[in-house]
Image (tube, coloured by chain):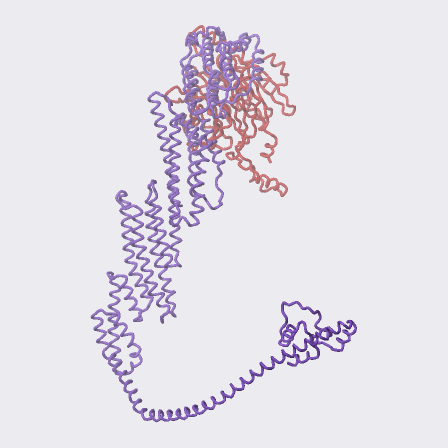
Chain colours: A purple, B red
């Protein structure tokens, strides 16, 4: 109000309402929010609405700045303002006055009401004192009686208790008669402390003695029952519970309980053992492994679980909150249980392992896997019951061992299968030889052999794959995820098998070297091709297959494909070399015998080619066919394969002539050596037993080289007569006619045959060679 | 040499000069014994030629005692054969054996120039003829090593004959003999006198088997059946280890046997690419084994693992000074492995004989069919490694 009054001095007309509002707001501490201030500085002394308004300054300012007319306007404005402010003021004062009047009325009314209430309160206090008095009086009168009643009820209670006590022996007896042991024990439990407390009084002592003897009897009976084999697990646990309540030593009870359970579990085990024994005796009639494991799981493991549960219930969990908890009995009981379970489970495991080992069949192992799975699952349940035991780890170990064993068996099976199929091949080869159609279907044999081996590998992989199937519980174990896949299956099984193939092939080379071709050469050839095939494709195929199926997760180094391939290639090379050697040996043996047994000095004039040479050519041809079935043709050195025999023979005979001519004249020994030496300078050194390539021509070349070199060496050991030399000439020409087509470089054959003829000429007493034309005639006739 | 040759031996009784005897093998010309002297310092080969008119020489062996005495197995001379050929239609080429003595002036290694001697070949003095008419072809004649040179063994077809040389080696008497019996035609191919057991054992080879004989009782003491896949060509005893035997054969292999365990070879090498014709232990360093083969190669192998000095002379070197201990350390770090030391390919024809020099243990000769004799040394580096 006072602030309003300060504005009295000057008033302004045009914006009165707003200014009043602004003033009010200012008074009540409200800022004009949001509205931009029209007039800038609130401290301006010329601001007529500002708090720092100074009329003098304002007037001076006006006077200085304004014209007269403006001053007049200002003045009228001011007057208008002042009027409106006055009227506003009047309205406010009126309103406030009304409110004040009504407040005064209200206060008057309240005063009246309070007075009335005070009176009522006084009245209430008086009444309350009266009531207190009354109640005090009543209680004082009733107190005596109340005390008496309390006493009486106390006596009654005592009497009832005494009665209970006196009746206790009889009750207990009755209970025992009725076999209501639980009740008996509970009765006794109630009375025991009282009896104990009052045992100095003779009567109570009598009762106590009676009770004790009865209870001893009861305990005895319970124990008997406990030891009685026939009682069920539930009965047993009840017994134990009661006995525990009777303060029997827990340790003893544990032992007894366990030993009792043991006898029953052992029955199960014995059953299993009997089953196992039967299965050992007569494998055919025994239950299969799944049944066995099932039985084991249901009987033994089930009972064991039950036992553990009840045992823990009895001795561990219950006692934890009981009075005995302080005596470390749970720990003791647990330890006992652990030892007990481990002991039994060990036996069970050994049985299971026996059974698994008895499972030797290499066929479908889904049964085994399922059995193992079930086994593993049950053990996990067991492990949940008994967290501290090493049962699950042992069980997993068994499973792992079984899997490993399985892989070993499969490897052995694969190997024996391989050997069997080799024997089959051998037999069919022999049969072919008997039936005359020599090595007619080697290629067929090869394909069946490799296909059957591949099939076998695949089926084995499929079997093994069962171990890692998704729905099998233990396949999640790290062993089965990692090591089993990479080490077991890939390395142990597949790589092992491939290595075995290579190794057995090598053994063929080495063992038969001494016995002289105990293996049929065709088999060598077949195996060589097989190994080569493995090197080129099969190994990588098998390994890819394996890797796909068994995505090994661990990073242990595995044998790389290349190493296996090179091993296979090595084996193939060895086999082929050996084949060449064996075949060369057969032919050269023939040649050697033929040269050694003949009397070359006194032989007759050659009329035809010796049968041996024909045989050699025949054999070579059959070898050619044999090898051609399995190996590619190979590259010959550039020569005109259509060159007619005539030009070839002329060429060679002219060479022979050139070489021998001087040597027949004893006067010029120098020339012979010179010529032959020069000849040798230009011809390459020949490695006789050199490794061959994987093609027909190379193989044949190797065989022919060996044979001819043998021929040469044998010839050098003999002395020839004239006709002996001529016979050699005929033979060599014959060989020349037929052998060139087999070899990669016919010059090689020429060279060796020239050597033979040359050597025999050297070793001839009467070196007069046969006419080339005669030789040709003889050969063509033969 | 200008002639084919198969037979080679070192002059065993000679310990000063490096000397080899080579016998030529030629049907048509006079055969010769070439005495090859090798002058180590000047690298010069001297050659003296002796005529061997009896015939082509298949085997030659020198007496261990008298350096001028040697034996040959020979086919009868061409002319003689021809004569018999015309006289008797059923004549055969028979291999005989005889003991010869070379002329005195050559005995000690004469200093004649090779040209003179070859132009003027001297004849041999026949000491005695080993009469074998009853026994067939002589395959080889072996002197008893380390004795007075009075005993000979000859192998003739399937007979094993022990000869005593009497009356200053001019007469040979068969003191005992034994035969190899079995089905088929059995022929001895080669044999070797064991230097151990007081020279009472020899080993022979026939076909694929190696047999040991006790010459006191003339009975077989062991037999390695199927020692090689094919014919056994040659044998040699380890000079230092009494039970060790090397053999070689047509299966390109060289095998080392312990004759106490004949079921399996101790070691088997397969380095040659054709028949191995000859195998020889070095006389003083038995890890060095020389083999010659008809693939025209000679291979010198170092069989440390089965030699008598498997790791060098380590035992002896225990007492050596520190300085030398360093050497020893090095050696222990790299013990010699069984390995091929060298392959010699100088020959162009089949090598039928190799022989160590009796005078210089680091030197050996090899002979190929074309008559080329090559003398080689053990590589120097290896020599020092073995010696040091």
Task: Report if residue B319 is visible in the image.
Answer: yes
Count of numbered marks: 0
Q: Nearer the viewer, residue B173 or A259?
A: A259
Where is B168 relative to A236, above or below? above
Q: In this image, A493 relative to A53: left or right?
A: left
- Choose between B41 and A487: the one closer to the eye: A487
Image quarter in which the C terminus of chain B is found:
top right
Is residue B128 visible in the rendered image? The answer is no
| Residue B172 horizontal side relative to residue A313, left or right | right
* Residue A624, quarter of picture: top left
Q: Residue B140 location in percent, x, y?
A: 47, 20
Quarter of the image with the N terminus of chain B in it:
top right
Residue A644 or residue A284, whichever sits in front: A644
Identify whether A86 is placed above or below B261.
Answer: below
B322, B71: nearer the viewer: B322
Q: Quadrant of residue A542?
A: top left
Residue A753 image point, x, y percent? 49, 15
Where residue B376 appears, as percent x and y from the top left, is 59, 25
Q: Is residue B348 left or right of residue A600?
A: right
The location of residue A134, given as percent across then percent down, is 35, 93
Q: Is residue A186 above or below residue A302?
A: below
Which residue is the extreme one toward the right? A64
* Residue B42 occupies quadrant: top right
Residue A425 relative to residue A53: left or right: left
């Amino acid at each position: 109000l006072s602030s309003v009054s300060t504005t009295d001095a000057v008033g302004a007309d045009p914006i009165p309402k707003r200014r009043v509002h602004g003033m009010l707001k200012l008074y009540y501490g409200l800022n004009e929010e949001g509205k931009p201030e029209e007039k800038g500085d609130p401290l301006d002394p010329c601001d007529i609405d500002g708090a720092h308004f100074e009329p003098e300054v304002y007037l001076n300012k006006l006077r200085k700045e304004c014209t007269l007319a403006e001053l007049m306007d200002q003045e009228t404005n001011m007057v208008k303002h002042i009027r409106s402010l006055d009227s506003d003021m009047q309205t406010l004062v009126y309103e406030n006055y009304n409110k004040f009047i009504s407040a005064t009325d209200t206060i008057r009314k309240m005063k009246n009401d309070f007075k009335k209430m005070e009176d009522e309160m006084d009245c209430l206090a008086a009444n309350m004192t009266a009531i207190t008095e009354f109640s005090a009086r009543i209680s004082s009168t009733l107190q005596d009686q109340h005390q008496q009643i309390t006493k009486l009820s106390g006596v009654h209670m005592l009497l009832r208790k005494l009665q209970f006590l006196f009746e206790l022996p009889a009750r207990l007896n009755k209970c025992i008669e009725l076999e209501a042991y639980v009740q008996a024990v509970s009765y006794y439990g109630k009375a025991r402390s009282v009896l104990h407390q009052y045992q100095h009084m003779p009567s109570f002592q009598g009762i106590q003695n009676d009770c004790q003897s009865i209870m001893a009897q009861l305990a005895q009976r319970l124990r008997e029952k406990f030891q009685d084999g026939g009682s069920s697990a539930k009965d047993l646990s009840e017994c134990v519970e009661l006995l525990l309540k009777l303060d029997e030593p827990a340790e003893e009870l544990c032992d007894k309980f366990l030993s009792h359970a043991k006898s029953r579990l052992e029955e199960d085990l014995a059953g299993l053992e009997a089953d196992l024994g039967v299965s050992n005796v007569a494998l055919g009639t025994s239950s299969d492994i799944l049944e066995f494991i099932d039985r084991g799981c249901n009987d033994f493991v089930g009972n064991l679980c039950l036992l553990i549960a009840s045992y823990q219930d009895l001795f561990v969990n219950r006692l934890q909150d009981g009075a005995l908890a302080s005596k470390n009995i749970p720990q003791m009981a647990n330890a006992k249980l652990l030892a007990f379970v481990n002991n039994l489970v060990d036996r069970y495991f050994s049985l299971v392992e026996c059974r698994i080992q008895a499972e030797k069949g290499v066929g479908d192992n889904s049964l085994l896997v399922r059995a193992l799975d079930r086994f593993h699952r049950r053990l996990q349940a067991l492990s949940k019951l008994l967290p501290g035991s090493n049962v699950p780890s042992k069980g997993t170990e068994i499973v792992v061992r079984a899997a490993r064993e399985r892989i070993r068996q499969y490897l052995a099976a694969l190997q024996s299968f391989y050997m069997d199929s080799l024997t089959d091949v051998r037999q069919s080869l022999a049969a072919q030889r008997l039936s005359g159609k020599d090595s007619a279907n080697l290629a067929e044999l090869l394909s069946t052999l490799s296909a059957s081996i591949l099939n076998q590998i695949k089926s084995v992989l499929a079997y093994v794959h069962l171990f890692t199937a998704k729905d099998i519980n233990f396949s999640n174990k790290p062993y089965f995820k990692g090591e089993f896949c990479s080490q077991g299956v890939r390395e142990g099984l597949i790589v092992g098998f491939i290595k075995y193939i290579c190794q057995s092939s090598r053994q063929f080379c080495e063992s038969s070297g001494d016995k002289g071709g105990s293996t049929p050469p065709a088999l060598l050839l077949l195996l060589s091709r097989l190994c080569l095939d493995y090197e080129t494709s099969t190994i990588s195929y098998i390994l890819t297959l394996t890797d796909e199926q068994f995505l090994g997760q661990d990073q242990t180094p595995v044998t790389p494909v290349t190493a296996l391939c090179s091993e296979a290639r090595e084996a193939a090379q060895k086999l082929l070399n050996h084949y060449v050697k064996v075949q060369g040996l057969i032919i050269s043996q023939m040649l050697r015998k033929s040269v050694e047994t003949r009397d070359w000095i006194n032989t007759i004039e050659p009329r035809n080619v010796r049968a041996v040479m024909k045989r050699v050519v025949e054999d070579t041809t059959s070898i050619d066919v044999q090898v051609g079935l399995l190996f590619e043709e190979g590259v010959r050195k550039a020569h005109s394969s259509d060159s007619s025999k005539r030009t070839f023979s002329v060429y060679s005979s002219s060479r022979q002539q050139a070489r021998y001519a001087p040597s027949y004249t004893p006067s010029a020994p120098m020339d012979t050596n010179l010529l032959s030496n020069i000849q040798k300078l230009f011809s390459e050194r020949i490695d006789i037993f050199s490794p061959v390539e994987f093609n027909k021509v190379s193989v044949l070349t190797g065989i022919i080289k060996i044979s001819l070199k043998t021929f040469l060496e044998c010839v050098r050991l003999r002395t020839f007569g004239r006709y002996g030399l001529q016979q050699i000439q005929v033979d060599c020409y014959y060989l020349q006619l037929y052998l060139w087509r087999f070899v990669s470089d016919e010059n090689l054959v020429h060279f060796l045959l020239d050597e033979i003829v040359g050597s025999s000429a050297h070793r001839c007493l009467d070196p007069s060679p046969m006419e080339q034309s005669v030789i040709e005639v003889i050969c063509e006739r033969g | 040499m200008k002639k084919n040759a198969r037979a080679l031996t070192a002059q065993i009784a000679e310990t000063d000069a490096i000397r080899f005897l080579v016998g030529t093998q030629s049907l048509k010309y006079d055969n010769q014994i070439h005495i090859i002297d090798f002058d180590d310092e000047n690298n010069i080969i001297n050659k003296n030629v002796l005529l061997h008119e009896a015939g082509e020489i298949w085997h030659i062996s020198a007496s261990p005692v008298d350096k001028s005495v040697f034996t040959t197995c020979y086919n009868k001379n061409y002319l003689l054969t021809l004569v018999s050929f015309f006289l008797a239609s059923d004549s055969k080429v028979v291999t005989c054996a005889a003991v010869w003595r070379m002329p005195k002036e050559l005995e000690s290694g004469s200093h004649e120039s090779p040209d003179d001697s070859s132009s003027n070949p001297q004849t041999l003095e026949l000491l005695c003829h080993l009469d074998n008419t009853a026994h067939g072809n002589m395959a080889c004649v072996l002197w008893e090593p380390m004795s007075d040179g009075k005993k000979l063994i000859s192998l003739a077809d399937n007979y094993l004959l022990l000869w005593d040389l009497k009356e200053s080696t001019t007469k040979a008497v068969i003191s005992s003999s034994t035969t190899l019996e079995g089905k088929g035609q059995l022929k001895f191919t080669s044999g070797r006198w064991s230097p151990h057991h007081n020279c009472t054992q020899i080993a022979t080879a026939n076909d694929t088997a190696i047999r040991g004989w006790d010459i006191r009782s003339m009975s077989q003491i062991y037999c390695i059946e199927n020692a090689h896949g094919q014919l056994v060509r040659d044998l040699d005893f380890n000079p230092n280890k009494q039970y060790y035997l090397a053999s070689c054969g047509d299966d390109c292999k060289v095998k080392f046997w312990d004759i106490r365990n004949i079921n399996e070879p101790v070691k088997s090498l397969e380095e040659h690419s054709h028949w191995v014709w000859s195998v020889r232990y070095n006389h003083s360093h038995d890890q060095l084994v020389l083999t010659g083969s008809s693939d025209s190669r000679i291979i010198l192998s170092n069989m440390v693992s089965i030699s008598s000095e498997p790791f060098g002379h380590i035992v002896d070197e225990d007492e050596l000074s520190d300085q030398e201990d360093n050497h020893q350390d090095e050696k222990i770090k790299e013990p010699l492995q069984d390995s091929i030391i060298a392959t010699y390919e100088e020959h162009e024809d089949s090598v039928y004989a190799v022989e160590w020099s009796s005078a210089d243990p680091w030197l050996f000769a090899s002979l190929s069919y074309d008559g080329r004799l090559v003398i080689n040394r053990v590589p120097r580096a290896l020599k020092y490694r073995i010696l040091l």
